[in-house]
């Protein structure tokens, strides 16, 4: 077999089907080993700089001294679209649309011959925050973007992940997380009314990367001397590795994550804060701006913050445990 040395331009010309007369041999360090191979790893011996055409996956690959890596050319891989509703073992070039009850998707061995440079797509097709799709790796020993096997989970509708094998682990090519605004009903703390509960409750959440944004309003019922609070969508938990204060309770200052405004008193507004030492899935109303405790959760009746018929408006953003950016 003759060995030829080509420029990068020549290689892409071949990939695009251009006449080989346009490929001009040059004394470079890349060695074009064979016009077509179904299994590039079968070449022996392999020398750093060897280039082969993988006819199974329609891509050119170069030997970097350790493994063959894909560097372009050839036809784009075609997705194998598949809808799954139960535990599934994915194969390269799968595009998995997951829906139904929570289940696990197991990825192929990233180090298998022919897998390096190959991609897999996974899309969350569920409609509920209780539908979680977990990614496992081969033997549980490989990672996904540096995240351990079993720890990378798709949580929200439309979340889409595209990964590629580097010959050892799975790396992330793209990750779509953002959603539109979705209605939800938080559990409101007793401070906003128990005997007569709040009415006109209208709250929405939106995922942005690893965080959830919440905005909404409600009309207070019969307010009581208790802290005003709001649960997160899906009762998800705060990611305490990404909030500034993680040991406080409702009796001490917390980290500010948003704002509230009340129609009860002119100028009645303040911060929304966390109290991780009390709850990992709830945020709280803190004292009115300019008062002595602007970061400490307070009773809803303090300063007439809440009263029967008072409208409360809030917005806050918090990082959610388990959500990947």
Image (cartoon, grey):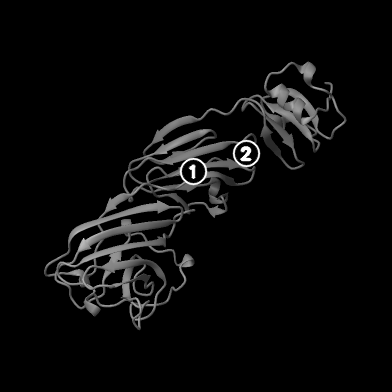
Residue 55 x/y as whole percent: 65, 24
Q: In the figure, is residue 282 to the left or right of 21?
A: left
Q: Relative to residue 305, is residue 9 depicted above or below?
A: above
Q: Nearer the observer, disc 1 or disc 2?
A: 1
Q: Is residue 260 visible?
A: yes
Residue at mark 1:
161
Q: In the figure, is residue 6 to the left or right of 268?
A: right
Residue at mark 2:
112
Residue at 73% across, 28% down: 52
| Numbered mark located on residue 24 in the image | none
Density class for disc 1 (Cα within 10 Å; few <14, some 14-19, many ≥20) is some
Q: Relative to residue 45, is residue 214 depicted above or below?
A: below
Residue farthest front in this picture: 266
Residue at 40% across, 62% down: 318
CA gap between label 1 and label 2 equals 21 Å
Residue at 56% across, 50% down: 145
Question: Marks 2 and 1: in contact by CB < 8 Å?
Answer: no
Q: Secondary structure at mark 2?
A: loop
């Amino acid at each position: 077999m003759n060995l030829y040395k080509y420029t990068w331009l020549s290689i892409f010309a071949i990939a695009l089907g251009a006449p080989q007369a346009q490929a001009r041999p040059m004394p470079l360090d890349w060695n074009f080993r064979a016009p077509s191979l179904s299994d590039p790893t079968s070449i022996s011996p392999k020398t750093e700089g060897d280039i082969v055409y993988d006819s199974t996956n329609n891509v050119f690959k170069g030997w970097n001294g350790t493994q063959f890596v894909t560097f372009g050319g050839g036809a784009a891989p075609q997705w194998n679209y598949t809808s799954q509703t139960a535990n599934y073992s994915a194969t390269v070039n799968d595009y998995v649309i997951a829906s139904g009850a929570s289940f696990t998707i197991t990825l192929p061995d990233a180090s298998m011959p022919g897998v390096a440079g190959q991609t897999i797509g996974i899309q969350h097709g569920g409609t509920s925050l209780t539908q979680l799709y977990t990614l496992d790796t081969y033997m549980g020993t490989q990672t996904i973007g540096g995240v351990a096997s079993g720890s990378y989970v798709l949580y929200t509708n439309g979340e889409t992940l595209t990964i590629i094998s580097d010959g050892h682990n799975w790396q992330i090519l793209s990750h779509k997380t953002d959603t539109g605004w979705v209605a939800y009903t938080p559990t409101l703390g007793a401070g906003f009314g128990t005997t007569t509960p709040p009415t006109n409750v209208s709250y929405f959440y939106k995922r942005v990367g690893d965080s959830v944004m919440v905005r909404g309003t409600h009309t207070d019922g019969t307010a009581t001397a208790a802290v005003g609070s709001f649960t997160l969508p899906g009762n998800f938990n705060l990611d305490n590795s990404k909030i500034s204060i993680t040991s406080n309770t409702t009796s001490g200052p917390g980290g500010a994550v948003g704002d509230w405004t009340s129609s009860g008193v002119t100028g009645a507004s303040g911060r929304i804060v966390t109290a991780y030492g009390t709850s990992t899935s709830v945020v709280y109303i803190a004292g009115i701006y300019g008062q002595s405790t602007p970061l400490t959760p307070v009773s809803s009746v303090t300063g007439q913050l809440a009263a029967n018929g008072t409208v409360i408006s809030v917005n806050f953003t918090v990082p959610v445990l388990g959500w990947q950016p």
